[in-house]
Amino acid sequence: MLTELGDEGVQILAISPDPNERSQELAERLKARYRFLSDRDLAITKRYGLLHAGGGPKGQDVPAPATIVLDRDGLVRWLTVADNYQVRPDPADVARAVRAIK
Amino acid sequence: MSKYGLALLSLVIAIGAVVGYASLLRVPFIRNHPLLYVVAFALAAAIAAVATAQAPHWPNVTALALALVLLALGGYLNFVMARIPLGPSVLRVGQPAPDFTLPDAKGAPVTLASFRGRTPVVVVFYRGYW
């Protein structure tokens, strides 16, 4: 998804409730600068106010898709939270937000 | 234009919207404007409705029925099924993001604050594979 950011010297942390093994498979398949983090009980998703209760196909809780760009001080510089699960941020917009930090 | 040109046009728009949206999901502009397929179905329905009003023959009625079914399904998907109710966000531009420590794919803990002073971070929350 964010291969545009491959050489930008940025750390991508991808968080989902998926078990670690499945994230590992995905990480190896993509060979991207992603670190896949597992939020099994959605505690961090809730802390970020991103819980989509009952939003999964089997009625389970899932995160609302969100992308947050943080600068070196840990401050939010850009963010987008989807209100429609068909929609994803344009990788070019994310890359632009990251480049604006430099 | 043939006798059922409008019905044909309606079918092409409706089917074209389905095929086009499904095959262009990787194009961010298409993916991020799902309303486009709803508009296409509505346009197909309007054209077929005009054709049916002019001549209530089965090709026109069939095109109208198909467009209306697609419009109902597409509208339901876009406006009901895919909708994510959002609570008040805790995130503000210019404010710090809440810290966290989560296990990575190998089980090693990763702490957001450990990147401070080192590198920008993009945090992506995604729904997962289920």
Image (cartoon, coloured by chain):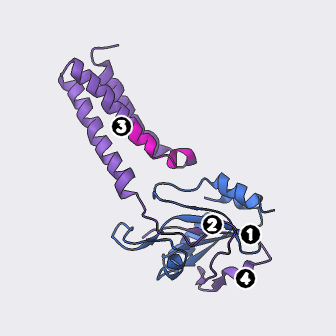
Left/right placement of residue B115 relative to residue A17 reads right
Amino acid on which the number 2 mark rests in the picture: Ile
x and y percentages locating residue A39 in the rendered image: 52, 80
Q: Hey, which quadrant is residue A89 in on the image?
A: bottom right
Which chain does the numbered disc 2 sit on? A
Dot 1: element: loop
Dot 4: element: helix
Q: Which residue is mark 2?
A: A68
- Mark 3 is surrounded, within 10 Å at the Cα level, by few (under 14), some (14 to 19) or many (20 or more) other residues, namely many
Amino acid on which the number 1 mark rests in the picture: Asp
Dot 2: element: strand
Dot 3: element: helix
Q: Residue at x 45, y 68 (%)?
A: B129
Left/right placement of residue A56 relative to residue B96 reads left
Amino acid on which the number 3 mark rests in the picture: Phe
- Mark 1 is surrounded, within 10 Å at the Cα level, by few (under 14), some (14 to 19) or many (20 or more) other residues, namely many
- Residue B25 visible in the shown view: no
Q: Earlier in the sequence, mark 3 or mark 4?
A: 3
Q: Which residue is mark 1?
A: A71
Q: Which residue is mark 3?
A: B41
Magenta-highlighted residues: B29-39
| Secondary structure character of the magenta stretch overall | helix
In the rendered image of the structure, the colour used to display chain B is purple
Q: CA distance from mark 2 to mark 1?
A: 10 Å
x and y percentages locating residue B123 in the rendered image: 63, 70
